[in-house]
Amino acid sequence: MAIQQTLSIIKPDAVAKNVIGDIIRRFEENGLSVVAARMMHLSAEQAGGFYAVHKERPFYKDLCAFMSSGPVLVMALEGKNAVALNRQLMGATNPKEAEEGTIRADHADSIDANAVHGSDSEENAAIEIAYFFNSLDVNSRS
Ligand code: CMP
C-alpha cells in the first residue's frame, strides 16, 4: 500500500474538550505520523475558503461559523493508505452513524460539531495541505 499524506483538523468542539492528545494517540497507534501541525483560530473567511467546495450547500454558513468559533489544530498526517485510514479512524460524518470506537462516536456531538475533519481523496488532501502549509512545514518521515 502506498504511503500517503492527508489533512486532519481537530475542530473547535474537540479542542474545547481537551481531547487533542487522545485523537493524536489514535492516529499514532494506528500507523499515522504527524508531519505538520499548526494551531489556528480561523476567521469565517478562512474557514469559507477551506470549505469552498461546499459553498452552495445549505449548511455552509453554519459550518464556517462553527469552524471559526474557537481554535483548531490543523495537521498533515502520513502513513500507509493515510487518506482511507484516517477516515476509518474518524467514523461517519454524522456521529449518530459513526461506528463504535471511532473518534466521532467517542467525541462528536452533532454533524456540525463532529470533532475532526479528514481529506476525502489523495487529490483533495494535496489541495487541503497546501491551503495551510508550505512545503517547508511538511516533514515527511518516509
Ligand atoms: P467535514 O468532514 O469537516 O466536511 C464538511 C463538514 O460539513 C462536515 O464535516 C460536517 O461537519 C458539516 N456538515 C453539516 N451538515 C452536513 C451535511 N448534511 N452533510 C455533510 N456535511 C455536513
Image (cartoon, helix red, strand yellow):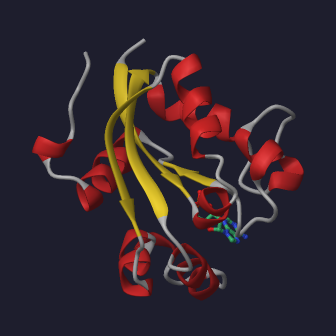
Task: Count the labels in the image.
Answer: 0
Who is closer to the viewer here, 99 or 56? 99
- 42 left or right of 137 in image: right
Whether residue 137 can be seen here? yes
Residue shown at 10%/43% (left/top)?
Answer: 136
Rendered view: 138 above or below 129: above
Residue sticking out furthest to the front? 18
Is 124 left or right of 127, judged from the image as shown? right
Q: Residue furthest left?
A: 136
Q: Where is residue 111? Give x, y as percent.
A: 75, 65
23 left or right, relative to 9: right
Q: Quadrant of the N terminus?
A: top left
Classify the position of the C terminus by image quarter: top left
In terms of image quarters, where does ligand 1 lie? bottom right
| Residue sitting at x 48%, y 34% | 83
Image height check: is 125 above or below 141? below
Q: Residue at x 67, y 64 (%)?
A: 13
Q: Position of residue 114 (x, y in %)?
A: 70, 59
Residue 57 visible within the image:
no
The front one of 38 and 81 is 38
Q: Position of residue 65 (x, y in %)?
A: 57, 84
Q: Position of residue 11 (x, y in %)?
A: 57, 60
Residue at image location 64% in from the left, 36% down from the top:
22
